[in-house]
Image: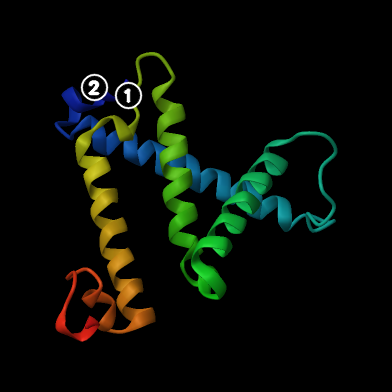
Amino acid sequence: MFSGLESVTGVSWVFWSSLFAAGLMALTGLAVKSRIAATNGGVVPDEGLSLRNAVEIVTEMLAGLAETNMGPNWRRYFPLICTLFFFILISNLIGLVPGIDGATSSANTTWAWAIISFLMHQYVGIKEHGWGYVNHFLGPSLYDL
């Protein structure tokens, strides 16, 4: 499907599959927002297993994991972690459909997310611990003696 779009438009299939995954995420977000804005406000959980309940379970699991590993400031960086998780999840699920390659099947996408994750990790480390954070990457020093 995406390779056909590539031949017609000249734009790489990775861009099209990434755009498709982002569109699915946006539509899901709009559906959730409209559900919350409904009459009952979405406060009462659905009965049984629904898509909403499944997403809430996964989000709560990620929130617990982030809180355990990141400490009290986990909420500040959780949107990036959750976005990365759901992008990879949806891209990999799209890749299961025959004839459609997921966005994560391209090394360009995985390298882009790796660079974003690495830079964010370093930014947060320096922001939270100051420039002394970089010192622990340098190995033994005279200050440790």
Give the residue number, with chain letter if any, for mark 1: 101
Q: Residues within 10 Å of mark 2 (few under 14, many from 20)?
A: some
Q: Is residue 113 above or below residue 71?
A: above
**Residue at 24% over, 22% down:** 3
Q: Nearer the viewer, residue 110 or 39?
A: 110
Q: Is residue 12 left or right of residue 127?
A: left
Kind of element beneath mark 2: helix
Q: Residue at x 57, y 52 (%)?
A: 62
Please identify the quadrant where the N terminus is shown: top left
Residue 51, compared with residue 39, is above or below; it is: above
- Tell me, yes or no, whether the two marked residues, 2 and 1, touch with CB atoms within 8 Å: yes
User: Residue 56: x and y, percent?
Assistant: 67, 48
**Which residue is painted at 82% across and 42% down in the image?**
46
Read off the residue under disc 2: 3
Q: List x then y, in percent, for residue 117.
A: 31, 57
Q: Amino acid at mark 1?
A: Asp
Q: Name the quadrant containing residue 91.
A: top left
